[in-house]
Amino acid sequence: MKNVLFVASECTPFIKTGGLADVIGSLPQALIKHEKMEVRVILPLYDEIPSKWRDQMTYQTSFHVPLGWRNQEASLYTLEHNNVFYYFISNDYYFTRKGVYGYYDDGERFVFFSRAVMEALQHLDFTPEILHAHDWQAGMAVALAKIIQPIPNLQTVFTIHNIKYQGLMPHDMFDEFFSLPREHFAGFEWNGMLNCMKSGLFHADKITTVSPTYAEEIKDPYYSEGLHPILLERSDDVLGVLNGIDTDDYNPLKDSYIEVNYRHSRIKKKENKVLLQEKLGLAIDPEKPLFIMITRLVEQKGLHLLQCILEELLHQEDIQIAILGTGDQEFEGYLSHIAYHYPDKFALRLMFDEGLARQMYASADFFLMPSQFEPCGLAQLISLQYKTVPIVRETGGLKDTITPFNKETSKGNGFSFSNYNAHDLLNVIRYALSVYYDNDNWNQLSKNINKSQFSWKESAHEYVSVYRALSEVKV
Ligand code: GLC
C-alpha cells in the first residue's frame, strides 16, 4: 500500500477560489483507482465551507500547535466523500473569517496550518509515506516535515500551481513562528523575505508543476517571479505533469446544468446558444459566432490584450462575446463600460455561477484564453469537452494541450498565437472566424476536437511513478 497525504488550501466541492481546488478535488479520485494507492487530503476548516458539508463532518480530536511563543488550539474533523477521506483543521482565530484569502496575516494563517498538519500527523488513523503539498499555502508543511520529522522517512512532493503567489513575510517572522536553529534560516529565506513557496522548493524531495512547458518556463526569469535560481539548481528534481479534468463531471451529455444535452451535435449546441442569448440579453441568432471567457479578471488571464482590441473587434466583426467572472476593479469597470455600449453584442456577468458557466461552455463557439502565463489552465480542457474551440496564447499548459488548426494539414484542436501582443490575438480571432465560415474546415476542426480529451488517466499514472520512485530511494 502506498499512503499519500495531500496538503492544500482549497478543494472542490468544499471550497474553491481557482483551478487548484479542481485539481485537489479530482486527482485523489483518479489516484485511488490505482492498485494499492491510498490518498487522503488535509485542508483548513474555513467558516466559508457550506454547512451542508460541515454537518457531515465527524469531530476527531483537539491538540496544541506551537507557533513560536504562541500556543494555538486546533481541532481535527473528518469526512468521507466519493471514497476519499478528508481531514479538516479548525481554529477559530485563523479560519473563522469571511472568504478564503486576502487577510494581512495570510502568511501566518498558512504557517499555522502547515504547523498544525505536523501535529495532526500524530493523531491520524493513517500513516502517510508521502506528503504531497500544493502551492505556497502548503510550502511550510514540506519544510517542517523534513526538519521536525513527525514521521520517520516521510518523503515529500511539492507541486507549483502558480509561482506568482509565494506567501511572503518579513524575515524576522522565522524566529516568531519557529523555534528552529538558525542554520535552517537559509532554507526559508529568499531575497530578504520569509518565503513559503521557496521553503517548499528548497526542502521537497521532488518538485512538480502542472504542465511540461511551465516546468521549463519557470527556469526563466520572465516567468519565474524571481525563483529561477532555485529551480535551476534543483532542475533534476523538477517535473511537469499535465493536469486533467473529471470527464464524468464535465460531460455535455449528462450535465444537469444545461438545457439541451448533447454529445457532438453542433445543432444542439446552437439550441443552447439561443437560450443563453435570451438569458444574457444578446441579439438572438443561432448562427452568430459566440466567444466566451470564464475567468478571474486579472492581468494573468490576458485582459490587457483584450482591452486593446475589444472595441475594434466589436465594431468590425459580426460576433458576440460573453464574459463571466470577477476580479480587479480596472477590468470590471472597463468591461462594464463596454457592456453598456454594446448590449446586443457583448454580455458581462460579474460573479461566479457554476450553472451559468456550464451553459456558456455548452453554447459558445469559441473560448478565449490569451493568458500572459498559464501554469496549466483547466478552462481550455473543459471547452474541448463541450466542443467549444479554444483560442489560446502558446504558454504553459495551453501550449501543451492546444495545437493550432492548420488548413493544409487538417490537424489541430484550436487556435493559438505566440507573442503577448494584442493584434496577434486579433489576427488569430479573424483566422478562427474564417474557419468558422468554411464548412469543410469547421467540420474537420470539430472532428479533431471530438477526439481530444484530457482526463486524469495518464497524469495520475505519472504521479504514481513519482511516488514509487521516491519510496524506492528510501529503501
Ligand atoms: C492555478 C493556475 C492554473 C492551473 C491551476 C491548477 O490556478 O493558474 O493554470 O490550471 O492552478 O493547477
Image (cartoon, helix red, strand yellow):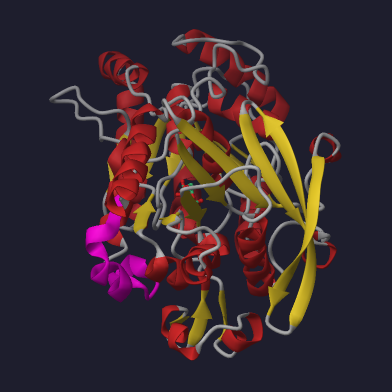
Task: Write the residue at 49% across / 23% down.
Answer: 247
Q: How many numbered marks are there?
A: 0
Q: Is residue 102 left or right of residue 222?
A: right
Q: The N terminus lies in which quarter of the figure?
A: top left
Q: Is residue 386 magenta?
A: no
Instruction: Where is residue 113? Give x, y as percent.
Output: 66, 63
Name which quarter of the figure residue 353 lies in.
top right
Image height of 469 relative to 318, above or below = below
Image height of 338 relative to 409, above or below = below
- The residue closer to the viewer here, 329 or 247, is 247
Q: Is residue 229 magenta?
A: yes
Name which quarter of the figure residue 445 lies in.
top left
Residue extent of the magenta highlight: 220-240
Name which quarter of the figure residue 412 lies in.
top left
Task: Write the residue at 25% across / 35% down.
Answer: 404
Q: In this view, does 283 lie to the left or right of 379?
A: right
Q: Is residue 205 left or right of residue 124?
A: left
- Which residue appears farthest toward the left when viewing the image? 408
Instruction: Where is residue 84? Give x, y as percent.
Output: 61, 32
Instruction: Where is residue 307? Give x, y as percent.
Output: 50, 56
Could one spot residue 394 in this view of the protein?
A: no
Q: In this view, does 202 lie to the left or right of 122?
A: left
- The residue closer to the viewer here, 472 or 341, is 472
Could one spot residue 339 in this view of the protein?
A: yes
- Examine the residues drawn in magenta and state their main secondary structure: helix
Image height of 306 relative to 365, above or below = below
Instruction: Where is residue 181? Give x, y as percent.
Output: 51, 87
- The residue closer to the viewer here, 459 or 398, is 459
- The residue closer to the viewer here, 406 or 137, is 137
